[in-house]
Amino acid sequence: MRWRACLVAALAMASVEMDSVETANAQSVANTIAEFGLIGTWAADCTKPASSSNFLTVYAIKPSGEVSRTYYDQPDHVHNNYKITSAKRQAPDMLSYEQVWDFDGSPANIAGNRVQVLLNMADGKFQIVSSQGSDGSFFVKDRKFPGSADESPWQSRCPGN
């Protein structure tokens, strides 16, 4: 009987420790993203509504401390939503992060549920340098969209954010 009480206590302590590690990781990610200056709403053209050619990108810290990245492709329509699970400064103007799908159901595309992203920040704007799905496919590679010569757009922070 005593061994059961010890086992229950050990499991409870392990659960508390795991929660503490997850909370610390969320705080670390949030700090890195905030220090890089990403928290807020961003767009290629903040004077125009969200559209398939003018995504609104919102980086936010949730009450849980987790960081979300949400794309809007129409006013009030979420195209996709990810939770940022790790973030690291690669240089003063470069940030890499991993994001995981944060909706019920399957990801919006066949690239998988995890995406590795590399951003460049310059003059208060950011550009996606690289964005690669967990299946190895690229959304952006060397600042360009695959199969096109189009560069990923620079996004500016929208007023009020």
Image: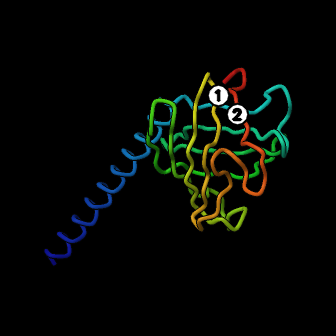
Q: At label 1, which amino acid type do we have?
A: Lys
Q: Quadrant of residue 125?
A: top right
Task: Give the structural element (helix, strand or loop) at label 2.
Answer: loop
**Height in image: 145 above or below 31?**
below
The quarter of the image holding the N terminus is bottom left
- Distance Cα–Cα, label 1 vs label 2: 6 Å
Residue 39, percent from left and from top: 58, 32
Locate residue 69 relative to residue 98 in the image: left or right: right
Foreground of the two, 45 or 153: 153
Foreground of the two, 65 or 106: 106
Answer yes or no: do the residues labelled 1 and 2 have beta carbons within 8 Å?
yes
Foreground of the two, 81 or 135: 135
Q: At label 2, which amino acid type do we have?
A: Trp
**Height in image: 14 above or below 130?**
below
Query: Mark 2 = which residue?
Result: 154
Residue 105 visible? The answer is no
Locate residue 14 relative to residue 142 in the image: left or right: left
Going 27% across and 66% down the picture, which residue do you hit?
11
Locate residue 152 relative to residue 17 in the image: left or right: right
Going 72% across and 56% down the picture, which residue do you hit?
146
Residue 63, percent from left and from top: 53, 40
Task: Give the structural element (helix, strand or loop) at label 1.
Answer: strand
Which residue is farthest front? 149
> How crowded is the residue under tag 2: few (<14 C-alpha within 10 Å), some, or many (20+)?
some
Query: Mark 1 = which residue?
Result: 125
Give the mark nearer the N terminus: 1 vs 2: 1
Residue 77 visible? The answer is yes
Residue 13, percent from left and from top: 25, 59
Which residue is farthest left? 2
